[in-house]
Image (tube, rainbow, N blue to C red):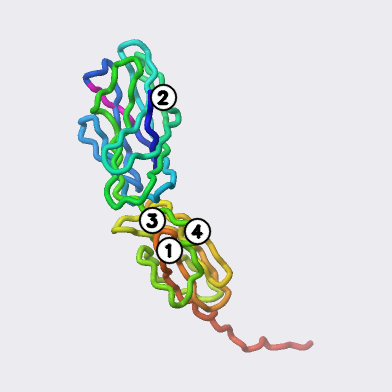
């Protein structure tokens, strides 16, 4: 059976539903995470909505479990992805199919997907299971995945050009204000947000002189750094999602007492 490829995000899913076209059962249930919300009204369609944008071309992973059985002959069933709105995902399932029998069984699978290009609109696709013996699950049961936006991927050289004092501020970066001082360790908390939505998998770079560190944002759009500058100056924060840079001032080291310890003779 031909199946369309797609991709994206990681979390445990529990699959279960009973369509009239199938004598057995396939039930769907999804556990919500910080990456997405879940709506299940008992109709057989579980709606999974990402809380943030994804980056074009970046592979996402979604793990799930399936509970299913058939009352007819045993059969192999294939996982498929159907585009509903927006872009068609490039997707792979592991495993790509499961073997159904009359006895209810549980299966663990992973969907890996990516979306090809920038898109400010919603992208929606559906995960479903199709038996090869003709019992078919119809067009009802499945997991509906909705992604609010896809941001463009940028090359590192273009996104991370050397910042200068005149560089404009990056509009998609929020940096928590923190008092930095030479010789003292502090946390620099950054967050990447586009159109009011946090971006998962964005690259964030901080630079201070010749020292450069890069991290990827988590599912809530955060990238957190631990820094200990050795001197005063300016620390720059950039991302590959938008141009520009944010800045944090590094103050001089605290003065220590210059009074010499008393000398003793014996």
Task: Tell me where residue 15 appears, x and y as whole percent.
Answer: 32, 30
Instruction: Report the magenta residues as a range.
Output: 15-19
Residue 62 visible to the viewer:
no
Q: Nearest the camera: 14 or 201?
A: 201
Query: Label 1: how many residues lie within 10 Å, few (<14), some (14-19) or many (20+)?
Result: some
Task: Tell me where residue 83 appears, x and y as whole percent.
Answer: 30, 36
Q: Are marks 4 and 1 in contact (CB under 8 Å)?
A: no
What residue is shown with label 2? 97
Using the rendered view, name the quadrant where residue 237 is placed.
bottom left
- Gap in angstroms between the C-alphas marked 4 and 3: 19 Å
- Gap in angstroms between the C-alphas marked 1 and 2: 42 Å
> What numbered label is drawn on residue 79?
none
Q: Secondary structure at mark 3?
A: loop
Vertical side of 129 occupied by 119: above or below: below
What residue is shown with label 1? 189
Q: Nearest the camera: 58 or 206?
A: 58
What residue is shown with label 4? 156
Considering only order in the chain, which callout, 3 or 4, is on the residue closer to the N terminus? Answer: 4
Q: Residue at x 34, y 33 (%)?
A: 81
Q: Main secondary structure of the magenta part?
A: loop
What residue is shown with label 3? 221
């Amino acid at each position: 059976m031909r199946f369309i490829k797609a991709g994206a995000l990681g979390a445990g899913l529990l699959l279960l539903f009973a369509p009239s076209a199938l004598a057995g059962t396939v039930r769907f249930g999804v556990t919500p995470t910080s990456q997405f919300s879940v709506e299940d009204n008992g109709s057989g369609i579980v709606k999974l909505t990402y809380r943030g944008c994804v980056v074009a071309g970046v592979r996402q992973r979604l793990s799930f479990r399936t509970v299913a059985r058939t009352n007819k002959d045993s059969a192999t069933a294939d996982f498929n992805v159907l585009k509903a709105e927006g872009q068609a995902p490039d997707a792979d399932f592991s495993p790509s199919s499961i073997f159904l029998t009359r006895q209810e069984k549980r299966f663990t699978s992973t969907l890996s997907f990516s979306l090809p290009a920038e898109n400010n609109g919603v992208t929606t696709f559906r995960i479903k299971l199709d038996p090869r013996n003709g019992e078919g699950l119809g067009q009802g049961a499945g997991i509906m995945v909705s992604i609010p936006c896809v941001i463009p991927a940028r090359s590192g050289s273009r996104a991370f050009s050397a910042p200068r004092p005149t560089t404009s501020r990056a509009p998609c970066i929020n940096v928590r204000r923190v008092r930095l001082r030479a010789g003292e360790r502090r946390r620099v908390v950054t967050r990447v947000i586009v159109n009011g939505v946090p971006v998962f998998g964005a690259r964030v770079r901080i630079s201070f002189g010749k020292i450069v560190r890069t991290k990827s944002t988590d599912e809530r759009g955060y990238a957190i750094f631990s820094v200990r500058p050795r001197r005063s100056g300016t620390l720059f924060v950039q991302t590959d999602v938008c141009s520009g840079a944010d800045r944090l001032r590094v103050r001089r080291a605290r003065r220590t007492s210059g009074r010499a310890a008393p000398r003793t003779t014996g």
